[in-house]
Image (spheres, coloured by chain):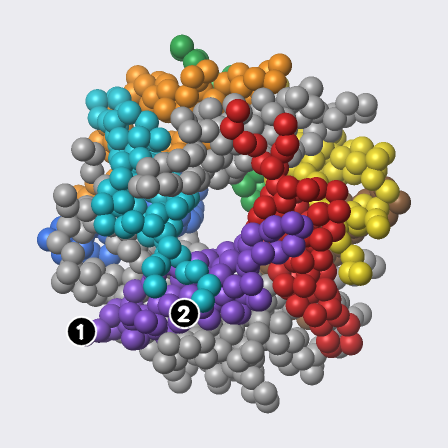
Chain colours: A cyan, D blue, E purple, G brown, H green, I red, J yellow, K orange
Amino acid sequence: MSSVYKLIELVGTSTESYEKAIENAVAKAAETLKEISWFEVVQHRGSVKDGKVEEFQVILKVGFKLVD
Amino acid sequence: MSSVYKLIELVGTSTESYEKAIENAVAKAAETLKEISWFEVVQHRGSVKDGKVEEFQVILKVGFKLVD
Amino acid sequence: MSSVYKLIELVGTSTESYEKAIENAVAKAAETLKEISWFEVVQHRGSVKDGKVEEFQVILKVGFKLVD
Amino acid sequence: MSSVYKLIELVGTSTESYEKAIENAVAKAAETLKEISWFEVVQHRGSVKDGKVEEFQVILKVGFKLVD
Amino acid sequence: MSSVYKLIELVGTSTESYEKAIENAVAKAAETLKEISWFEVVQHRGSVKDGKVEEFQVILKVGFKLVD
Amino acid sequence: MSSVYKLIELVGTSTESYEKAIENAVAKAAETLKEISWFEVVQHRGSVKDGKVEEFQVILKVGFKLVD
Amino acid sequence: MSSVYKLIELVGTSTESYEKAIENAVAKAAETLKEISWFEVVQHRGSVKDGKVEEFQVILKVGFKLVD
Amino acid sequence: MSSVYKLIELVGTSTESYEKAIENAVAKAAETLKEISWFEVVQHRGSVKDGKVEEFQVILKVGFKLVD
Amino acid sequence: MSSVYKLIELVGTSTESYEKAIENAVAKAAETLKEISWFEVVQHRGSVKDGKVEEFQVILKVGFKLVD
Amino acid sequence: MSSVYKLIELVGTSTESYEKAIENAVAKAAETLKEISWFEVVQHRGSVKDGKVEEFQVILKVGFKLVD
Amino acid sequence: MSSVYKLIELVGTSTESYEKAIENAVAKAAETLKEISWFEVVQHRGSVKDGKVEEFQVILKVGFKLVD
Amino acid sequence: MSSVYKLIELVGTSTESYEKAIENAVAKAAETLKEISWFEVVQHRGSVKDGKVEEFQVILKVGFKLVD
């Protein structure tokens, strides 16, 4: 039978960069999901404190194969 | 490590209002998820019967922190 | 033959709430259309007068079955 | 000369309803702007605490005439 | 209490058609979810090999009722 | 005078394919409209029963010339 | 009772400009609809022949009050 | 330090054309802002009276450099 | 050096199905491009003649690797 | 075999109007492409100098048939 | 009374990264606004010179609380 | 005659960052195009292997002047 994949939506955060925020979200998802193969960024946002960026936040979808 | 959040997509319904429909969806999600902190509405729709609104339906995303 | 439905776009108004604005639009449409079964909200807007909301306006699509 | 209007983007909040959240934002804007004549909702969202909706939040654009 | 539904996002694949790709995704989801009642297609895409379509891929959301 | 066209929004359904669903909607519209010349698909969706696709549903806009 | 408006979607054409294309569509609609009060442009497109613009085409929605 | 720009959203109007409506909005903004360097159109709309276009309305964003 | 891909936008047509329309566009592109590896559908539309679908038209983007 | 078309994305400019900007882009494209048959506008923007519109800029897609 | 926030739209620039471009825009806004608490990225773009990226440009909305 | 620009769509990749992915795509395009002056990011995505980000992928449009 043909492959079926699932997409879940996560928010990763980092005080350094969006790339780190994505890596954090992917690493967290990988703790329970073994077959992650791609991601798609939905939105870039962040929090500000005392006039400085406090945290970069990225909303992303992570795709993985559903095993039989 | 930085926080990671998950977003799930729900449809809440109510015969009264969209606010009730959102509250119903959040309450249902809260039965199994302890860390819900925000929601974003995706679409407002509803069903009609005999020329009257039967049910308000709201598609929303509910966000919660993934615990370590 | 399979069912075919039609969607028409309306603007409902109310001085009270968006739910009332939707109900007003659906009631008006139901005067001439017997088979309305659902609606989808396209936009929420409104008018303001003297610093107060004067009217809630909702753009919605109303769907109904085309009878044979 | 023809009229020119300006749109500003606000977030209104309410523990009760989106209509109240809009009214709160419009009332706040009306403290300094005299010529507000319409608004358009951009997004509906909210915060959740202990499994219950804590606050309804509405992002809206408020339009007003630029006086000569 | 009013019904609450959940939407999950899947990618179905097929070498034949998008309808087959949708059916494959729905069938896979139905292995663990008993109450699926509708789906909405998000995107149509596919892979190409040696100048020929290798696989039709459809991203879709599958909706089902959350049982009490 | 230059030509003017009108677009109406329909939902076609079929148990077989989206192409059949489109053809069903176009055929229904053609019963009363003589000058249909094009269509644009707005959304692909469908219903599911007992873990199988029950019906393919396509929302489309049908364009036709307004005769003088 | 509160006012209800209807929106219909038209395509106006002109060999001169988009403004003329809009005016043509509005004029055509006004032959049968007495209460048109606004329009919203959906898309600007056109046809080309022998390397020159042949016709400007504008898709627009025309709004009018439904009389009681 | 690198340049920072601000975008404000305006609605320009004209009884003649969208170009005039844009020029009116830009001229009005230029009364108080010295560093406007570009604009982006967000929406084209208009009002209708007695079956004729009364006013072309254009929603646009105007960008200008924030001076140090 | 890292791979770079290019996307071109095509319209494929078929009297039978959207899958055939996609295959026709991919086959045409493959006459001059050797490294096509994926496609993404942008829009489904079509032409109608005498109340019947004359042609299914699909706008798609075709992606291929730029060779060094 | 069924026809295949290609869409390319251009930016036309004019100090006079968007119609002229479109005509300029189409004329430029027609120098090398013989089969252009339609265009679709993607965005209207422009540059401002000394508080006046300097140039109208239009992003458009131009479609033409791929010859065999 | 409930809190009301305002969103303003800025363009930040940097020759290094999008994170720096965001930080530059936030820092500039913080010179006059004391209560900035979040930002949302609207678009990523940039300028190119002699075949190299000259500047990363980010359009973002910055949100801050309106003080009473 | 007024300037005309062309936009082409590329996918840049990098194991390090999105900025590098953009620079790779721009550098590749600059091998054959001399007049590139800006780019606009369309989407951020990437591939994952063994629970780690393998590659950052950015879809972007690159704009350049068409020389006479």
> Which numbered mark, 2 or 1, is in the foreground of this view?
2
Residue I33 x %, y %: 70, 42
* x 70%, y 70%: residue: I16
Residue H36 falls in image quadrant: top right
Q: Nearer the viewer, residue A60 or H51?
A: A60
Q: Residue visible at 26% across and 22% down? A: A52
Mark 2 and mark 1 on one chain: yes
- The vertical placement of I55 against G49, above or below, is below
* Labels 2 and 1 touching (C-beta < 8 A): no
Separation (CA) of disc 2 from disc 1: 22 Å
Q: x, y percentage for residue G3?
A: 46, 67
Name the chain letter of the residue that bears numbered label 2.
E
Residue K28 or residue K46, whichever sits in front: K46
Q: Which quadrant of the view contains residue G37? A: bottom right
Q: Residues within 10 Å of mark 2 (few under 14, many from 20)?
A: many
Q: Position of residue H42 (x, y in %)?
A: 54, 41
Q: Give the letter of the chain under mark 1.
A: E
Q: Which residue is mark 1?
A: E68
Residue type, numbered disc 2: Val
Residue at figure coordinates x 67%, y 63% from the top left:
I20
The quarter of the image holding the C terminus of chain H is top left
Q: Give the label on residue E26, or none.
A: 2
Identify residue type, mark 1. Asp
Q: Is residue G48 visible?
A: no
Nearer to the camera, D59 or G26: D59
Can you name the residue that lies furthest to the left here?
D50
- SS assignment at label 1: loop
